[in-house]
Amino acid sequence: MTSVTCTAPVNIAVIKYWGKRDTQLILPTNDSLSVTLSQDILHSKTSISANKEYAHDRLWLNGKEEDITKNKRMHNCFRETRALRRRMEDEDSSLVPLSTYPLHVCSENNFPTAAGLASSASGLAALVFTLAKLFNLPNSMTDLSRIARQGSGSACRSLFGGFVAWEMGSEADGSDSRAVQIAPDTHWPELEALVCVVSDAKKGTSSTSGMQQTIESSPLMKERLQIVPGRMEAMKKAILNKDFQAFAELTMRDSNQFHSVCLDTFPPIFYLNDTSRGIIQLIHEYNAANGGVYKAAYTYDAGPNAVIYASKEDMKEIIQLIAHYFPPSEEKKSTYFTDPYNVLQ
Ligand code: 2P0
């Protein structure tokens, strides 16, 4: 038996991916850009074993066995990585024919699944990376990102640390739709992320179906697709220059625009709740109280949980502020803070 265990981190987009031009190959309607968080706090851990004695492929997610036959996206990742392994075995007959062995996959997240905390991104990135290690594939992270993308779009960005762009590409076969690192995690050590778990309930509308409803019904989405290319360039520049003022404004505007196209979807999709909106207001008031100089920026994915970006220096004050206005409640479990000093370093 051959067995490998790997972890993959969560990434939080500052320019959001929302909408596919090809739902089979998972090709997006716009570029996106994210910050990869430290694996110390949030990660998916995946163990895969290959054994010719196994009857068939099996999957356990957070300790519970799932019906793998229904999981088309995992099959995409199995198919693509097995094909690369098969090519190696064809060229070198001394290799163990792992491409033909059934696989057992065990994956767990150390954070709420499907609560808008990018669990599919880290989960599918961990799957593809672990398969690549198991099969000893020589492929680069960018090559693997094309495979992870076919598991879950945002997963392609979790193969890199630091600041990562997913280039939408233009080829019909998806060969140029891949992730590239804009800057490594060491580039901007003063920047930190705080994750506020407003609710750990499973979200009502999945990202996969929500984004296609938006594409089909939102006139505002057409406007967004005109705006994103300029934002991508401005965001890359802000990151490379470590310009927090530009980074913060672009991050907040893009989060707000993403939730606006959700609201413009018909019927509308609501991911934010009253606590999420309260945190948005608090961050704007905090920035205004600092003479309009941005000290913090919020962003929200397909769920009510806030991610706040700020400098290491200001984060302590921001935690105190949020804890004061939105105290963590044992019974509602409304707010929970990760240790920001370990989240992004
Ligand atoms: C993002 N989100 O860029 C955006 C922001 C949610 C809001 O990527 O259908 O789970 O698997 O490709 O990757 C969530 O979408 O969707 C997502 P699929 P995915 O992070």
Image (cartoon, rainbow, N blue to C red):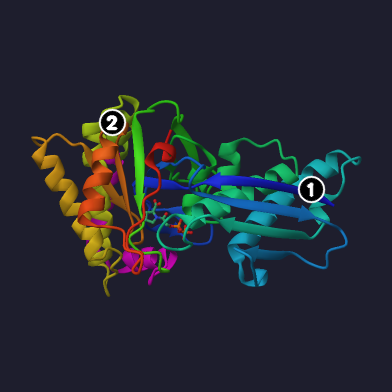
| Left or right of 329, for residue 135 | right
Ligand 1: quadrant of the figure: bottom left
Q: Is residue 326 found left or right of 178 in the rendered image?
A: left
The location of residue 307, given as percent across then percent down, is 33, 49
Per the rendering, the mark at residue 313 is 2
- Span highlighted in magenta in the image: 203-231
Observer-nearest residue: 42 or 156?
42
What kind of residue is marked 1? Arg
Question: Is ligand 1 closer than 8 angstroms to the Cβ of mark 1?
Answer: no
Residue, far right: 94
Query: Alpha carbon of mark 2 to alpha carbon of mark 1: how far?
Result: 51 Å
Classify residue 203 by image quadrant: bottom left
- Determine if the magenta segment contains residue 223: yes
Which residue is situated farthest in the front direction here? 330
313 lies left or right of 106: left
Q: Which mark is residue 86?
A: 1
**Secondary structure state at the residue bearing disc 2:** helix
Residue drawn at x 54%, y 42% as measured from the top left: 159
Disc 2 within 8 angstroms of ligand 1 (CB): no
At a point 34% along the width and 26% down the height, the residue shown is 240
Judge the density around disc 1: few (<14), some (14-19), many (≥20) Cα neighbours within 10 Å. some
Type of amino acid under label 2: Glu
Q: In the image, is residue 204 part of the stretch drawn in magenta?
A: yes
Give the dominant element type of the magenta stretch: helix, strand or loop. helix
- In the picture, measured across the screen, residue 300 lies left or right of residue 294, that is right
